[in-house]
Image: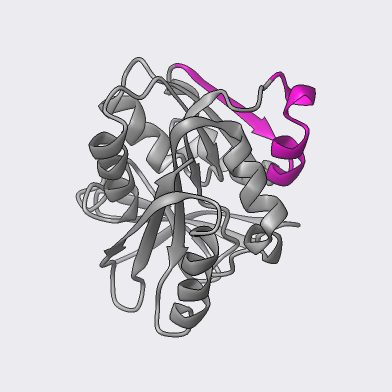
Amino acid sequence: MPKVIYSAQSEINGQVDVIQVGKTRKIKVQNIDQSLNWDAPSASRLVWGRAVDVLEQNEPKLKNILILGLGGATVQHLISRRFPEAFMVSIDIDPVMVDIAKRYFDLDTIPNHKVIVDDACRVIVEPENFDLAKNSFHAAYVDIYVGSNFPELGKSGNFVNAVKGMVMPGGLVIYNRVYTKDHQDEVNIFIDFVEGFLHDVKTVVVAGYTNSDNVLIYGRV
């Protein structure tokens, strides 16, 4: 049976639970799975593993990547194992989530990884204040959910353009969006919107658990 092994209250995410089910440890926010331990039996076939597949297929010589959203660092662990030489920068606004990633998901064991605890929009608009540079990343991965809610700011032209501005010409930008029935119309509009900023936009629908499909939206700068 699922066992809650830790709970915390966050100003950003509300109640955050760490749950153990057999060999799987997960973070739940608003009853949505935010992260799994990277070596969970299902991690590679769910959205985190499929995102790394997209990276491998489209950026096989990945040298660095900007990741907006940390959670339990599932995708960071998987990227590190698929691209051991790649340097990662992760941004997360919630110090509670970063603490959980350290305590329960081995965050500090990931090599070549820098974590910035701040608002992602602030960082990508003024990267020089965080020792980052525009047009310097081979890829960016955007996964900035609070529960099942994608922030309104993340749907704005300013945000999408700022993410694009962090990636070098020809580089790859990937968005993860929840693609359940209640969100499909909104996400389809977002896909059309992203096509105004990126080239050769493609999508991959990733089947999750019951009522928890995702879609990966990716294109070239």
Q: Position of residue 219 (x, y in %)?
A: 41, 48
Locate residue 16: give its quadrant: bottom right
In the rendered image, residue 42 lying in the magenta stretch gets the answer no
- Nearer to the camera, 1 or 105: 105
- 130 with respect to 191 (left or right): right
Locate residue 92: give its quadrant: top right
Q: Position of residue 159 (x, y in %)?
A: 68, 51
- Nearer to the camera, 219 or 32: 219
Query: Colour scheme of this structure image?
Result: one colour
Q: Position of residue 46 (x, y in %)?
A: 27, 56
Instruction: Name the residue located 64 percent from the left edge and 47 percent from the top edge.
Output: 161
Instruction: Name the residue located 27 percent from the left edge and 49 percent from the top edge.
Output: 50
On screen, residue 83 above or below 175: above
Instruction: Name the residue located 25 percent from the left edge and 48 percent from the top edge.
Output: 23
Locate residue 8: give its quadrant: bottom right
Asked if residue 39 shows in the view, the reply is: no
- 62 with respect to 154 (left or right): left
Q: Which residues are magenta?
A: 112-131
Marks counted in the figure total 0
On screen, residue 201 above or below 94: below
Q: Position of residue 41 (x, y in %)?
A: 19, 49
- 207 with respect to 158 (left or right): left
On screen, residue 104 above or below 23: above
Asked if residue 217 shows in the view, the reply is: yes
